[in-house]
Image (cartoon, rainbow, N blue to C red):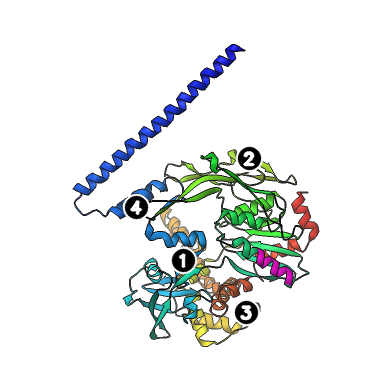
Amino acid sequence: MKNKIAILLLLSVVMGASAQNSREDKGFEISKNLEIFANVYKNLHLNYVDDVDPGKTMKVAIDAMLASMDPYTNYYAESDMEDVKLQVLGQYGGIGSLIHQEGDSIYIAEPYQGLPADKAGVRIGDRIVAVNGESTKGRTNADVSTAMRGQAGTNVTLRLERNGSEFDVTITRAEIRLPNVSYSGMVDGQIGYVRLDEFTQDAAKNVRDAFKALKKENPEMKGFILDLRGNGGGLMNEAVDIVNIWVKSGELVVETKGKVASKNMKSRTRMAPEDLDIPLVVLINGNSASASEIVSGSLQDLDRAVIIGDRSYGKGLVQNILPMPYNSQMKVTVSKYFIPSGRCIQAIDYKNRDANGRATKVPDSLKTAFQTRNGRTVYDGFGIEPDVEVEHETSSLLSVALYNRFHFFNYAKKFAAEHQSIPSPSEFQITDEIWQDFVSYLSDKTYEYTTYTENIISDLRKVADEENYMDNLKQQIDLLEKTYKEAKKEDLNRNRKEISELLADAILLHYYYRKGCIEASLSFDPDVKKAVEVLGNPIEYQKILSGK
């Protein structure tokens, strides 16, 4: 016994000394490399042939260093604080509009409803000729966006061009706070629906308020859909409080674990829930990340909701924002989060990289099985896998070409100038008359696109030529190519359903803003349709959650 104690004491001393030596070694390495860096910069400043911009050079060095960590660890100079406010709070100082670049011109892509640009009469499709007297010609989207932003209460003057006429409009900037709940309403008469775009400040309150309002207005509501598709995350506490709407107080939602043990924490629901019984569906896709995965993953682990859609992004990392000198800030990945079953859904291993320096995915061999409360098997390491996966049709190459050439945008602008009003979002459709007008509009427009079939025919021609079969096959290949080109002329009608949906979205934006576009899309959205189907079948709903 004494020998064992002596050995343990010796090991303790050796390990303590080893840890101390390790800390000293790292401390020395840090000091050494900081000294090297300082000397590199000093000699660059003293000897480089051109002047060196200290702020720009240091920013490049810091960004390169942080890029070797993960995409979420970033440094923000004082001039970037508006971006930080937009990420964390969903707000910034500006006029409240989206813009896009088409060639050398910048256009208003969408003024947000009720915000300064909208109130000042700015419309979708207005070309921004100048900002505060400075021409936008040749300037980038980012340049113009930066010029329009500024301190709340200050003015910015835009020279706009609309229908061939130019005019000035002066707009008073405001603290623009983007709504995190972009739409709430009923689907199929008996199913509530809320779309949450970001987990910014008050997201949980806004979701809770929308849910309560729908229940009050629709006492026979039989189910509820929370749409987190495209939601890249945000504040973790908002995610916990959203789960709390449908889960009792005291439930573990997420646990964080990192290097600094004192910062590790378990986050539990802490308020009275709104409804513990209503059937619940959460929609996710490949762009649902972070806080979206905490909500969908914890509700899945607790068997409180059916998850529908596509596998989520797989971001199980937590960031803190740390104050830095001279009003700068640093966002640092400090821990990983684990949801109630014990799994971490982080899908990318940023510590290990391939030969090209790219971070690698967590290999299947390292994935571990976990159990939900009802005993269903779920896995870590690759995002949240939906309980019901929905197949989605890929966008046609023609639709992509029309979108990238801004033909939907420009036709909608023309349409809005010619039509004072249209039916409500739920009733508006692309009629045969509108469709034929759009086809006519495209008749003198370019929107080149190369299909896979064209590539195959081209490759066949090359291979036949290389293998000396062209003399025998030229006539057949020419006929095949001619037949294909005739068939390609029908691509517009062949893809009419998909193109009509995109065209309707572009038109509705002019009359009913983003809310109207979402409302109209619910009638043909495959994920929403599947959610309504599952919620309308209580037996199937319970079967999914029980895993039987």
Observer-side mark, 2 or 3, equals 2
Give the CA separation, mark 2 to mark 1. Answer: 42 Å
Mark 2 or 3, nearer chain start: 2
- Do the numbered discs 3 and 4 sit on residues whose CB atoms are within 8 Å? no
Answer above or below: position of 72 versus 162: above
The residue that disc 4 covers is: 59
Measured as percent of width and height from the top left, residue 231 is found at: 57, 60
Task: Identify the secondary structure beneath mark 2.
Answer: loop
Q: Which portion, as a residue range, is magenta?
A: 208-216
- Do the numbered discs 1 and 4 sit on residues whose CB atoms are within 8 Å? no
- Residue 92 is marked as 1
Q: Decide if residue 147 is on the left or right side of residue 43.
A: right
Q: Which residue is drawn at the image coordinates 53% and 79% (left, top)?
A: 510
Mark 4 or 2, nearer chain start: 4
Measured as percent of width and height from the top left, residue 291 is found at: 58, 54
* Amino acid type of the residue that numbered disc 3 sits on in the rendered structure: Gln
* Amino acid type of the residue that numbered disc 2 sits on in the rendered structure: Thr
The residue that disc 2 covers is: 368
Mark 2 or 1, nearer chain start: 1
